[in-house]
């Protein structure tokens, strides 16, 4: 059992996860009406939602629980030229024989609330009853005061200093940030790095005589990240990058799985790490191999499905059975 599994099965992690999932929604409920009134009193018309995430995971393998004001649309102060964030988080990062643990309330405009160093805890202490009880007590104290501290900092914000980002800039920024965090839009779709999205229509047809089942994928419609989030904020799914990534014509292809076992994806990234596009499949199972043949990107799912993507027009996607492909 690796360290990640040991930590997640520990008494400390289980108790921490339980109280955070219970308390963060309650804290949000306490903040929201007062926050809404502040926005009304300041005559600030644009939405700045309060969001929270549980066991949020980045490429580095750390887990984080967070409650934050979503300043994605208003990221910069035009007075101080500083990025604005207002966030409370509890963070665990797994090292070789220890975890790095911290909980913090942060505001980029308050010098007294700058980042703190994490506490280093030996992994075997995570099942020590006395140690766990003391740490959970500390976190509970932090959570008890969190709503009040959030409101105090919100009241200090000069909303007129926040610079509005045009939608295309905002979408590009969010897509790139989510990619670096290890998340993509979890629908059958093609997501481009600029925030434009092509939704896919995927379905199966069964031949009544041969009983053969054939799956198809077609582009359905054009939309944007903003258009999707307008109706559903919970669109993101975590993905992992598998071994086997390769470069082709000034880009790098990476692939892997989604949060559910039936999901897979393939992505093109620039050599500087920026996302060009990612295609997510809800039916492929993990993509564990990919290669380029005659300007077609061939993706192999771990259950035998093969997906053929025309690199001259990536909306041309064909789902090919393993036997069909090898016999061509």
Image (tube, rainbow, N blue to C red):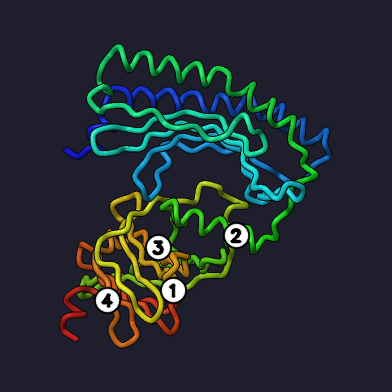
Contact check, label 3 and label 2, Cβ < 8 Å: no
The disc, 2 or 1, on the residue closer to the chain's N-terminal end is 2
- Left or right: where does residue 117 sit relative to residue 60? right
Q: Is residue 142 above or below residue 96?
A: above
| Foreground residue among 127 and 186 | 127
The residue wearing badge 3 is: 280
Few, some or many residues within 10 Å of mark 3 (<14, 14–19, 20+): many
Numbered disc in front, either 2 or 1: 2
Report if residue 73 is visible in the image: yes
Name the residue tied to disc 1: 218
Q: Residue 69 at x, y = what percent?
A: 62, 39
Give the alpha-carbon distance from disc 3 to disc 2, as whole Å: 18 Å
Q: Secondary structure at mark 3?
A: strand
Q: Position of residue 281 (x, y in %)?
A: 37, 62
Q: Residue at x 44, y 73 (%)?
A: 218
Q: Residue at x 20, y 75 (%)?
A: 210
Q: Which residue is mark 4?
A: 291
Instruction: Examine the image and state in which quarter residue 107 appears.
Output: top right
Q: Earlier in the sequence, mark 3 or mark 2?
A: 2
**Residue at position x 16%, y 80% in the image:** 326
Classed neighbour count for the residue bearing mark 2: other residues with Cα under 10 Å, few (<14), some (14–19), many (≥20): many
Q: Quadrant of the C terminus?
A: bottom left
Query: Image height check: is 196 above or below 314?
Result: above
Instruction: Compare marks 3 and 1 and give the one earlier in the sequence.
Output: 1
Q: Is label 4 or label 3 in front?
A: 4
How many neighbours does mark 1 have within 10 angstroms: few (below 14), some (14-19), or many (20 or more)? some
Which numbered mark, 3 or 2, is in the foreground of this view? 2
């Amino acid at each position: 059992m690796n360290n990640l599994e040991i930590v997640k099965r520990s008494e400390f992690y289980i108790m921490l996860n339980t109280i955070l999932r219970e308390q963060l929604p309650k804290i949000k409920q306490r903040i929201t009406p007062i926050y809404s009134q502040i926005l009304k009193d300041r005559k600030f018309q644009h939405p700045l939602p309060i969001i929270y995430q549980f066991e949020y995971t980045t490429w580095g393998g750390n887990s984080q629980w967070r409650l934050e004001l979503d300043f994605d649309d208003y990221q910069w102060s035009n007075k101080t030229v500083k990025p604005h964030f207002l966030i409370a988080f509890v963070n665990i990062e797994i090292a070789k024989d220890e975890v790095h643990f911290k909980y913090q309330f942060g505001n980029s405009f308050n010098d007294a609330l700058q980042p703190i160093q994490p506490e280093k805890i030996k992994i075997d202490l995570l099942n020590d009853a006395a140690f766990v009880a003391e740490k959970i007590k500390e976190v509970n104290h932090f959570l008890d005061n969190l709503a009040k501290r959030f409101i105090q900092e919100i009241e200090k914000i000069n909303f007129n200093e926040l610079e509005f980002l045009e939608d295309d800039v905002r979408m590009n920024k969010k897509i790139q940030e989510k990619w670096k965090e290890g998340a993509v839009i979890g629908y059958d779709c093609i997501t481009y790095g600029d925030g434009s999205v092509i939704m896919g229509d995927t379905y199966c047809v069964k031949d009544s005589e041969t009983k053969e089942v054939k799956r198809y994928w077609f582009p359905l419609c054009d939309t944007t990240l903003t258009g999707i989030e307008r109706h559903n904020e919970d669109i993101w799914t975590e993905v992992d990058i598998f071994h086997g990534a390769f470069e082709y014509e000034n880009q790098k292809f990476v692939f892997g799985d989604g949060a559910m076992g039936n999901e897979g994806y393939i992505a093109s990234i620039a050599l500087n790490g920026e996302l060009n596009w990612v295609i997510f499949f809800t039916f492929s199972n993990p993509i564990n191999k990919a290669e380029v043949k005659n300007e077609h990107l061939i993706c192999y799912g771990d259950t035998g499905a093969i997906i053929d993507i025309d690199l001259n027009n990536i909306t041309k996607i064909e789902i090919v059975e393993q036997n069909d492909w090898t016999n061509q």
